[in-house]
Amino acid sequence: MLLVALVVQALGRAADLPLSVFDTGTYGNWSQSGDAFRLGPASGPKLVELEIRNNRDRAVASSELEGDRPTGTLTSPEFQIARRHIAFRIGGGDMAGQTCINLIVKGRVVRTAAGHRSDVLAPTDWDVKEFRGAKARIEIVDRATGDWGHVNIDHLVQTDRPEMSDFDRPLYQEPLRPLVHVTARYWKERRLNPVEHQEGWINDLNGLIYYDGEYHLFAQRWATCWLHFVSKDLVHWEELEPAFFEESLGSGVQSGTCVIDENNTSGLGKDGHVPMIAFWSRFDNKSQCFSYSLDHGRSWKPGPKNPFLLKAERDPKVFWYGPGGHWVMVMYGEGSYHVLNSSNLTDWTDTGHPIPDSFECPDMFELPVEGEPGTKKWIVVQGNGHYSVGTFDGKRFVQEGERQVCDIGPNFYATQTWANTETGDGRRIQAAWMRGSVFPNMPFSQQVSFPCRLTLHRTSEGFRLHREPIKELSLLHGRSKSAGPVTLEPGRPHKLAAKGEAFRLVLDVSLDRGARLEFDVRGQKVTVSDDGVTNGTAEGRVARPVRHLELLIDRGSIELFVNHGELSSTRYALFDGEGITVSVLGGRANVKSAQVTALKAIWR
């Protein structure tokens, strides 16, 4: 019976029949009308330029090579329907009948599909069992000339095994979805909304703030809206509807910050409701605007005088300066951060004391020096993770010593810290956009680094920030295994885990002079010597001998912390193996203790 079942299954699932093979750089024997497809398929650098993603073939049928204005059709030769489904991937505009693909049988359109206002190609299929044996043609149509007036089609086949649409998988159960890192959802119920596009994408972090027992994480989706996540514990997150969108198509909502106006200096509070105010820049990089909420960020209104400030800068960072009793805004423009003051959050004055040689997405805050009660320093962090330590009097920042790097990893960008934590436990907690995190064939892209507590330490070389995962990571702990002490010898790898996808690995070690530890994390290498680490292409050195290591491993990342945060490396990684092993090269290593803990998902 089993053999019969297998034979029936094999007969019922014949080989796929390709309907488009455009990898030669032409449309072959497909016929064209109009100009939309005259330059041939999109491939190579053009796919990157047009932001066409999630394609399976090397070349994509595209009407976008000359923008959205050209129109036309692309029609296949006649073929016989010989499988139960016709499958393809589609992107572009969502205009039925205008930016679409049609199946034509006996001169009549019997099936049609349009894009979803995104160039992330979505797997789609038609059930065509009723037409089996009939003659048919495929028609790709672009009759639109305005915004999103194009269509992109990839991997068009007849099949008995249609690809499951990644956009229709159960939410947060997609096979590559990180388990312990924030990623954005794809709101499939809004797929045809003409304003909201690029669903599933996340970039610059914005407006991280704590208020009334709740942590808020906002982030850009390109420049169309601010995404909004909330959490009670900084590890379990819920993604709410986007907070607010661009005021008009093309105006853009770029990066910025949030404040809680407890004293209602803005006058926006009403009936005892404290305003949460989000400051942001329009896409023109000169118009500064704000949106505000009176219900803990669940609904938002535009500022009554937007733009409240016309200044050729962007990425406003706003905070309350207690000693001076005024608000401070730090904005990026012309290679510097400019410092402005205000008493009411709407009228601003430039202090005339810029912070030179700066770069995008500023963050600024005060930290106590560990072990020195009463001593505090101000920290200015740039979008690329470089930071300065110094003094600040509410108007002028004076740097002390050279700039340093928060994190040596290649995917650490647009970092921000949670503000208003003085109303909670006072910790300064940082996260970053892990820029470059691509998850093939998934309905989401990019991720957020795991939240880390920042502490400031005085060293013989000056003040240094340390970054360590927040203590709430333990809330995600699953099964744990401990080992050690053990002495590692060259040529004898030690297995730490056989399988699994998300782990916390903590080791106390000491190395012979010249020895190196090499971790094989599901096929990805991390190398540690006594004075530093190599994590992929990232390299860094530590002032003290390496004695403590922590690795946070997820489906798409390796985050490494040395000597309780003296050095950290945030790295995107997709894995091609199983298990975790550690080896030693060039000497011996004494592993005093090792603990490997499986991690549970942050999504409830």
Image: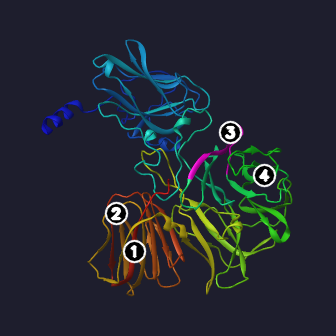
User: Which residue is outermost to the front?
Assistant: 271
Residue kind at label 2, given as amino acid type: Gly
Q: Earlier in the sequence, mark 1 or mark 2?
A: 2
Q: Which residue is mark 2?
A: 523
**Residue 38, percent from left and from top:** 48, 27
Q: Earlier in the sequence, mark 3 or mark 1?
A: 3
Q: Earlier in the sequence, mark 4 or mark 1?
A: 4
Residue kind at label 3, given as amino acid type: Gly
Q: Earlier in the sequence, mark 3 or mark 2?
A: 3
How many residues crowd around disc 3 within 10 Å: few (fewer than 14), some, or many (20 or more)?
A: few
User: Which residue is outermost to the top?
Assistant: 106
**Residue 592, percent from left and from top:** 38, 84
From the viewer's perspective, is residue 18 above or below residue 215?
Answer: above
Q: Nearer the viewer, mark 1 or mark 2?
A: 1
How many residues crowd around disc 2 within 10 Å: few (fewer than 14), some, or many (20 or more)?
A: some
**Residue 424, percent from left and from top:** 68, 67
Q: Residue at x 62, y 50 (%)?
A: 228
Q: Which residues are magenta?
A: 238-254
In the figure, residue 495 lies in which quadrant?
bottom left
Q: Which residue is mark 4?
A: 273
Q: CA distance from mark 1 to mark 2?
A: 20 Å
Q: CA distance from mark 4 to mark 2?
A: 53 Å
Q: Earlier in the sequence, mark 4 or mark 3?
A: 3
Q: Earlier in the sequence, mark 4 or mark 2?
A: 4
Say whether residue 241 is magenta: yes
Total labels drawn: 4
Q: Observer-nearest residue: 222 or 226?
A: 226
Q: Which residue is mark 1?
A: 595
Check disc 3 and report its element: helix, strand or loop.
loop
Residue kind at label 1, given as amino acid type: Gln
Q: CA distance from mark 3 to mark 1?
A: 51 Å
| Quadrant (top left, top right, bottom left, bottom right) of the N terminus | top left
